Structures are given as C-alpha cells and as structure tokens.
Amino acid sequence: MVQSIKDRVAIVGMGCSKFGERWDIGTEDLLVESCYEAFEDAGIESKDIQAAWFGTQNQMSGQVLAHAIKTEFIPISRLENFCATGTDAMMNACHAVAAGIYDLVLVAGVEKLKDSGVGYLTGGGGQPSSQTGAPVPPPAQFALAANRYFHDFGLSYEEGKKLLAMIDVKNHHNGALNPKAHFQREITLEQAINAPMMAFPLGLYDCCGVSDGSAAAIITTPELAKNFKDDYILVKGFGFAVAGRQGMLRDYYDFVHFDEVLYASKMAYEAAGIKNPREEVSMAEVHDCFSITELIVYEDMGWSKKGHAKEDIESGFFELTGGLPVNPDGGLKCFGHPIGASGVRMIYEMYLQLRGKAGARQIKDPKIGLTHNLGGTPGSFTCAVSVWGARD
Amino acid sequence: MESIKDKVAIIGMGCSKFGERWDSDAQDLLVEACYEAFEDAGIESKDIQAAWFGTTGLATGQPLAHAIKTEYIPITRVENACATATDAMMNACHAVAAKVYDLVLVAGVEKLKDSGVGYLTGGGGQPSSQTGAPVPPPAQFALAANRYFHDYSLSYEEGKKILGMIDVKNHRNGALNPKAHFQREITLEQAINAPMMAFPLGLYDCCGVSDGSAAAIITRPELARNFRDDYILAKGFGLAVGGQQGMLRDYYDFTHFDETINAGRMAYEAAGIKNPRKEVSMAEVHDCFSITELIIYEDMQWSPRGRAKEDIESGFFTLEGGLPVNTDGGLKCFGHPIGASGIRMIYEMYLQLQGKAGPRQVKNPKFAVTHNLGGTPGSFTCAVSIWGCRD
Amino acid sequence: MAGIVSYGAWVPRFRLGKETAGWGMPIEKAVANYDEDSITMAVAAGMDCMTGFDRDAVDGLFFATTTSPYIEKQGAATVAAAVDLGKNIVTSDATNSLRASTLAMRSALDAIKAGSARQVMVTAADTRSGPPGSDLFQAAGDGAAALLFGDKGVIANVLGSHSISEEVIDLWRAEGDTQVRTWEDRFVYDTGYLKLLPEAVSGLMQKMKITPKDITKAAFYGPTARRHGEMARLLGLDPKTQVVNPLFDQMGNTGAAYALMLLIEALEEAKPGDKILLANYGDGADAFLLEVTSEITKLPPRRGLKGYLASKRILRNAGIAGTWKGARGGGLSGGPPSISARWRERDEIDRLHAGKCLSCGLIQFPQQRVCSRCHTKDQWETVRLSDKKGKIFTFSLDNVAGGIDIPLAITVINFDGGGRGIFMLTDREVEEVKCDAPIEMTFRKLRSSGGMHNYYWKPMPVRA
C-alpha cells in the first residue's frame, strides 16, 4: 500500500531573493542570495547539505547550483517541468528525505529571465522542429480560456473585465505590503480595465511580468527538525498531474476548466486528509500568470462552484481579510515569474504565514497553506500542488 | 541516513533500436521502449502510478504523457547533462523507497538526429555574453588526453594504441548486439589512423550521434515477486555534481575526474563494496570518448592511478576479462541520446544479471555498475548506479 | 612643458613576404589576423605603452582611426576598458582623416597645458586598404601606436606645432566603402600631399626659427615609398641621415597610425638633445617639433615598434590574408550575445579581472562570490590577468568547433602567479601548441553579430 507523504518531511529554513529586474545580478548571485538566507534561517552552513534538488528551466544540470554555492561534489538533481518546476523539485527532495536516504537537503529554484532582452514571457525553446505550429505566446494561450469562459457563463465584456480586474487589484494590494516583490504599488480597477490589450480580453495588468528571482528551502525529517528550530512546518501532501495534450486531441474539451488542476488537487487533498477544501484550506498561493488563470483555479481547486467564482470574487472571499486569502504575497502579478523559482517562492510565503512572520500581510491563525503551479497551455498542463501545515 | 540497498526492484525493461531513426520522433521512440517494458513486466500503461522522465531536448513530463497516453499521473522531468537518465532512475527509486508509489515507470529518450549536425555540439543554456571559448565535446576530452599523455610519458603512438584498443573492444561487443546503432567490428589500424576530430582523438575515439529510448518499471522488493522471479535489486547510487572546481583551481591536473571518484565511492558505500576491482562483475561506463573510458578505469578504482595501460593491454576489460566493461558496445556503438543512455546501460546490466545477454553473456555476474558523466574536465555531473540479483 | 611620457606600438605577427605564394614581391607587409581590428590593435599598443606606468594617473584616452568598427559607438570607451583605465576619464574618438592621430595629439597636449588633465593617452590604429593592384593596396599595412602625454617625466618635449586645414577631396571613403577612393594621381599629389605637408613644415620652422639642418630625425607620413622619398627632398632633408626608415618593406603604410609609429621608431634610436620633426597629412597637414630629454634613458623597457617588428611569421600564401580581411567579423558564427549579461560581466571580459581570496589567497577567474577552496564568502581583491604571462596547461586542436581558424586551438591557461582560464589560442602555428608552452594575452574580436562586435582576450604564443 502506498503511504502518504503527510508529516514525513519538515522545512527548517527558507530564503527568498528580491525579485525584479536584477541587471547587476546573474543566476548564480541570485542562488547565493536565496540559499545563504536559508542557511542562516536554519542555522547551518553549505557544507552541512547532503544533497540538493535544483529547479530551473534555463540552466543545464545541477552544476550551476554547485558552482554558485560551492558544494563539494554532493548529489544535485536538476528538474524541469515548466512552471511546476519548483514544486516538482520540492516533491522529489521530499521523497528522498522520507525514504531516509538523506537527512539534510537543499531545494533551490532560480530563473534569470532579464538577460533575454525581451519584456514579456516568450515560452518557446524545445527541439528543432518543422516550425509549422502557430506561435501561441502565453497571453494568447490563456485568452483562449478567457473568451470561452465569458461565453459559457454569459459574462459581457464589461462584467468579465471587472472580475478579472478585481483579482489584479487584490494581488497588487498584497504585493504593496511585500518588500521582496518586484512590483510594490497598488493599482485601481480603472487602470486594470483600461490597460493596453495584450491578447483580448487580457490587458497589461492581467498578465504577470518578467522578473529574475530565486528561492530556497532546507528540509529534513520531523524527528530531526526540532534540532534546528521550534516552529518548523510540515508537508501535508503533494499532487502532481501531467497532461499529454488531451485537451487538444479531444474535441470535447471545454477550455473553461483545467483537468490537471482537478487531478492534482484531488491527489493533494487526499494525501493531506482534506475533505472540505473551501473550509479547511486557510490560504493559498496560486499560479496567477494571468488573472483568468487564478479565476479558473478558484473553481478547479474546489473553492468556488464551477461558473460561480464571480460571487466569491465580488464578496472579497479571496482577499487578505476574506475566508480564503489567495496570493497574500502579491502572487505572480507582483513577483513576476522566474520559472524555476516561483514554486519555491510560494512555499516561502506559506512558511512565513504558518509561523506568524508575514508582518503586514499576516493572516489570522492559519492552519493549512496550499501552493499551486501550472505550466503549459489550456488543454495540456503540468500542475503541481503542495500542502503545508504548522507542527502540532 | 539509510542506504537504498535492496529497497527497489526492476521488474521490466525495454530498449528501442538505437541509430539514425529518421522516421521516428521522440514520442515514437518512447512508445517503443515503454511498451516493451510493459510487456516484459506484464502490465499496462494504466497501472503506472507515477513516472520519471529523463531528457535534455524536451521540456516537462508532458511529452511522455502524450506518447504513452497516461491520464494525469505525476511525471517529473529530470535533466542533468549526461547523468540525466541515471538521475531520473535515482529519484524514482527514492519515491518507491519512501513508499509514496508502488509501481513507477522510468523512461529516457533523446531525438538528436533532427539537429542536422553529425556530432555532439554541447551548448544550450541561457542568454550570455558569448565570450566563452567554444569547446565542443571532443575538444573537452582532448584537454584530458593531451595532459594524460604528457603526465604519464606516453608517446603519441603509445597513447593512440591504448585508446584504439578500447575502441576495438567496444565495437566487438556492439557487433554482438542487435539493438546497437553500429554493429560492426573495427581494427586497431582503422582506429589509430582515422581522421582527427580534436587532437589526439580521431573519429573512432568519439561516440556518434544517435536517437534512442529506454525504459524501466520499478517497484518494491516485497511486491516484485508478483511480477517475476528474476527481478534485480538496486544496491546503491552515487551522484556527484561539480561546480567548476577544476577551472577555478589552477592545481587541477586534468588526468582524473573528481566527480567520478566521489560518485563511485558513494555508490560503493551504499552497496557495501570494499574492493571494487574484485567485487564488481561488469560495468557500463560513459565512453563518450576513448580517453574518458580509460580515465574512468582509474577513477572507479579498477586500475591503479596511471596504470590503466597494463589492464587494457592484458584484456582485463574485454568480455573474457576479469571486469568486462561496456559489454553491449557502449556509447561507441549506441551513440549518446542523452536522456536515454543511463537507462540503456541499466538495460544491459538487467539482461546480464538475468542471464539473458546471449553471445555477450558474462559468467555468473553478481554486482553490475553503470556510470554516466556529463560536462567537461574540471566540472562534471557524474551518476553511478549499482545493481545485483535477488538473493 | 608638455610632451611624451611613454610610448607603445603594435605590429601584427603575420607578414606577407618573399616566401608568400601569390604575393610576388620582395617586400614585407604586416597583416592583421582575422580576429584583429583597429580597436584590438589600439589596445595592444596601449598595453605596451602602460608598461611600467600607473594607470590611475591617466585622465583621458583618445582613439584615432579611419577604420573604426562602428559608425555610432565610441571605440575609445572599449579601448580604455580593455587597457583597464579608470572610470573618471575623458574618452574620445578622432576619425575620418589620416591626421586624426596627430590632431588627437594636439588635443592631448592642449589639455595638459591647460591643466585639465595630468596624462592623456593617444592611441591610433588602422586596417586600411586600396583597390587591388593599386599603389595604395601594395603599400598599405596594419598596425597601431600609443603615446602617453604629460608634463612630468617627459622623454620628449613638444616645443611647438603648426597646422593647416585645406578642403581638398583627394582621398575619401563613404559609408560602406571598404577601399579608399582617389582622383587622378597627378592631381592628388600635386595639390594635396606634395603641396600641403611642406607648407605645414615650413610654417613650423618659421615659428620655431629653425632650418632643415637643425633636424636630427624626421618622421612623416608618406602614402608610398616613392612619394615618401620625394617628400624628403622637398623638405630639404638628407634621406640617408635625417629621415627614419619608412618601413615600406617591413610593415607598410599604417594609415592614421603611421606617422606616430615612425615617431616611435625615431624615439627608439634617439639620444637626449635630438630634435625630431613629426609631420602628418590628410585634409591639411600637421607638423610638430620635439626635443628628446635625458628622461628617455630611464624609460622602462617595452616591446615597442622594434620588438613587434622583429617578431614575425611569413604567411604561406596570400589567399590567407584575403580570407582574414573578408572575415573581419572575428571568424566565429552565432547570434548576438545578451547585452545585459555582457554588461554585467564587463570587468572579467574587458579587463580580464580575476579575484584573489583574501582568506586563502587562491586566485580564481572569474571572481566568485564564494571561494572555491576555503568557501569564504565575499572577501576578494581584484587581480588583472591581461598583462600576465602564462603557460598552456593542456589544449585541444579542434576540427569541429567551426570558425575560420582551423583547427581551433582551445587551451587551458595557467597564469604566472596564479589563476586559470580556458581560451581560444590565436596567432599560432599548430606546432607551437603544446603542454607548458609559454603564452601572453591579447585583446581580440570573437565575432560580429547583429551589427555588434564582441571582444575578449585570447592567449598567443609569447612574441619573442
């Protein structure tokens, strides 16, 4: 019988770089920044790390991490899974710790996007190909979902834009309270609605930006965790679902839900023993690459009923002061999306929140924190979910 | 800390034909390898609970999901230069040892022949200043070869001869293997006089460019006997990742690879092996270039430092020798589809331990070692795995 | 009084010569390698000039050329960075005329006299060419000069100068032209060179109240050997004793750098008290009178014109030189680099700065955040590797890396004093590439892409 991962791994230290346009900082400097903060938080040195998991899209191999923090020939696995990269790295590291193979492990994610000379996420990469596929940049991918969602649920353009804008305003409000965020200023509903169009109906503020960043975590077994700190947090579950283009091959896929989110959340809730997500999840960091993505995730994660996210958005359910605050740190909207780092950055915010260290963004008495990452395009995603809780 | 020893079993494996597969893309190769593995294990794709996917050319786990049509199961994609496939196997084993999954697929693939280039280019990575010297793979290992000849006083002729003997050995083994890209023997003269790629490495000192895929089904030993009697067991892993120490430290000598030494030690310790030369029955090593295999003999503690020459000349590493290396023909005859190579090596060790290696069969094998090496002298990623029969 | 404090020169290693198939002439000409251009040669001359001198005292750098790699982007900024000068300096390009170098010299002297600079370096370099078969094509060579001007420790005072400007379009190039265009020979010389240069010299002599017999040595521009000889007579100088060898049979006419290189030749043979005439031509003419001081005997030894001229290899065939000229883009293919990444790494790329760990002393290139040996974080001292010699630790001669320099010599270099890097070896013959062979560093162009030129350092066999 399989065993759940619940309560078998603890995080005893974390670090997070300043996210933003870091012109004078390269990939390795970003890793030094986040990893050394994590070492300090855990009270350890780099030589204490027995193995590492490295999540990044752009760099090849674990050597980049070894070179940055000067580990001496320890095992470093490098993983890549689009936007789910960071969470995937955390998950694999947890397996190794739960299996008893290593006692003290580093998880690090990083992306240096601002050397590309381009101001927006291009997607792309991959092997030599026939190059006959349509170019569908990320805003366009999610516009496909937005246009169908408005259509299926009878939202006029104005109604739809307002809903999306409320999500943007919420996230900017949270980011303005966060010194590590790339963007730290509020916006108004009008600004969001009237912003220049990127891919109809998504405007500038509906899309997350391009930033550099890194985040890191030190993990160990719960038995050893109390040697490092009293307020460690525990993993409660992982969910991971990888598609194989089902939505593109099946002409009955509706573009207003993401199966991968349904599967991954189900896996994670089961592992964590969560039966009523809307009630039991205290807060979440979700993948708001675009505002429509966050909206659909509310429904697919089982927090709002399908087609009814509107009511919860309008009532403020997902705001910092609401029943299930989503993206309390400002989300991808304010941090941008350094691909390998995002998943770990989300866990960082849950780590702060569960330990009561989130300052002006602090949510009252959180019990369960959830992170969610989504990479790919509607019809074919990689989705990773992780669930965390305070120690008993 | 606990060892991985005897916590994971392989109950099925598959391997595609390696070569210039013009009419197959990466997904076709995965279907070929994975379905052979399913059949070997007696399962279907829907039985797989999670997968680990090793490849450098494709992004995410989605291409595997798309190829074999899994339904939203977890698939982690691993990339770690040439150590990719073994790293994927290692991570899959952790999950099984942690009992998070019961039945897991590990698959590796690389479709290299769409690049239009006949040799491994290395490269990739992010936007950069582009001021670094272009050091293609043959040049990287030529740096080691030239220094090795210099430090151990080998004349050009002496050096070329022992490198040539490694090439001849591997081609001879590959000629006995229907899955290999190259299945013909070569002579010592052909190897020594071949056109130069990067002095002193000639055409036959360098592995070729091929497409290929390989896959494994793994589970826990308690469950393994439900699938077959002759499953094999993981005995240890080693993964050592360099951070450019050799380039930053002007005292690195270019005639040994610290990463191999470290990964080998880690794996031997996990497996409880104290005298590698005696206890290792056979091995698949990363012969991207002949000089690489030579240095591995010393770094894996099979030949004493600087004296691989004697073992090469006495035939110690041939099929009939004391420690056969690259019994299936190695990278030399399979090429190096990066994400697949590590699993292809485990595939040969699996066949050998089961007594199913036909004309390549080694007698009474006990411990089988695989070794992968990615990067350049001074900074490698090295993965080692050790396997054995069930008791 | 303001004058010359130091000098440096650069002559490319490779020459067309008697043994070169397809050249057919018993004279030698200096040919820039495929990875050299006016900027790289100016850097080489500038490094030579700084031998034994303190970079902190240099307040300005001028770069003079008629063959700038860019139309809009300052070459002097690149040269100053590669020579590893400071940040609070004035950099300026002088271009569009053969006189660019001597006009820059005037500006440098004026700045020092006015007190707005302590020392200013003038670098000049050119890779000019005329139409195939023409006199200019036969006479043209590649090279560079660098002069450091100041008013302390002066080895040659500049006693005075005279300049004239004349609007005459005898020689010109427009955007996109690779070869110099001219009008009819007789016109070009009668109304241009042979008329205006003597006018400037005569104006100088009147000012300085001297006559030709007061000149110890004259260094002046000449487009070809024949015209140069004619000019000596016109100036009333004895070609055997009073004129420096114009080097048409060893180096060739190096364009904007030429007059300064001949001046350096004069300085290398000069004694204290010598009076040197310097004259240059192009859209007018400049003339200077210099007097050598006793400081010249104290100048720290450097390669100079003499050293680089003597260190040479004759090309096997003239076609190679043609290929190099055609590949003046650096010889490697590939797309443009990330400008932000290159900017961030500029100190290690342009200045070849390494770091020495203050805790354990290990020199590491590039400088790290965390020391590779003792793992101390952020405790570093900067070390410049560009002026260090070293040895080839190991190498590869590569036939698949691409580029035009085949086989591509890829070398791991251990620097004298510590530090290691991996680089492409240049200016090499295949037989010279061996473990432990001695090298020195040179600034070269790697590739041009997207209109941008990407420079970096390469080792080369030590130029004996």
Image (cartoon, coloured by chain):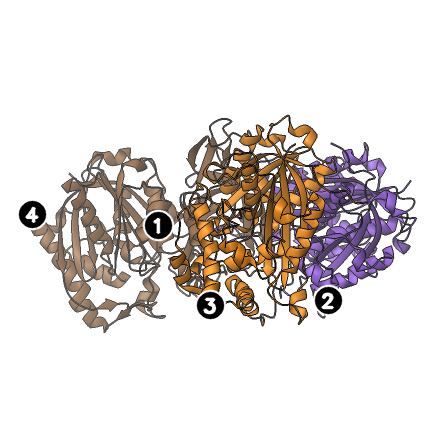
Chain colours: A orange, B purple, C brown
> Could you tell whether B140 is left or right of B287 in the image?
left
How far apart, in angstroms, are the residues tagged by discs 1 and 2?
A: 49 Å
The kind of secondary structure element at disc 4 is: loop
> Could you tell whether C210 is left or right of B353 in the image?
left
Q: Earlier in the sequence, mark 1 or mark 4?
A: 1
Q: Which residue is mark 4?
A: C209
Q: Which residue is mark 3?
A: A157
Q: Dot 2, crowdedness within 10 Å: few (<14), some or many (≥20)?
A: some
Q: Which residue is mark 1?
A: C78
Q: Position of residue C179 (x, y in %)?
A: 33, 68
Residues at marks 3 and 1 on the same chain: no
Circle nearer the viewer, 1 or 4:
1
The answer to whether residue A188 is seen in the rendering is yes
How far apart, in angstroms, are the residues tagged by discs 2 and 3?
A: 50 Å
The kind of secondary structure element at disc 1 is: helix
Q: Position of residue A85 (x, y in %)?
A: 61, 50
Q: Amino acid at mark 2?
A: Arg
Quadrant occupied by the C terminus of chain B: top right
Chain assignment, label 1: C
Circle nearer the viewer, 1 or 2:
2
The kind of secondary structure element at disc 2 is: loop
Marker disc for residue B21: 2
Q: Dot 1, crowdedness within 10 Å: few (<14), some or many (≥20)?
A: many
The kind of secondary structure element at disc 3 is: helix
Circle nearer the viewer, 3 or 1:
3
Residue at 51% from the left image edge and 55% from the top image edge: A313
Question: Does C283 appear above or below C44?
Answer: below
Q: Amino acid at mark 4?
A: Lys
Residues at marks 2 and 4 on the same chain: no
Q: Dot 3, crowdedness within 10 Å: few (<14), some or many (≥20)?
A: few
Chain assignment, label 4: C
How far apart, in angstroms, are the residues tagged by discs 3 and 4?
A: 90 Å
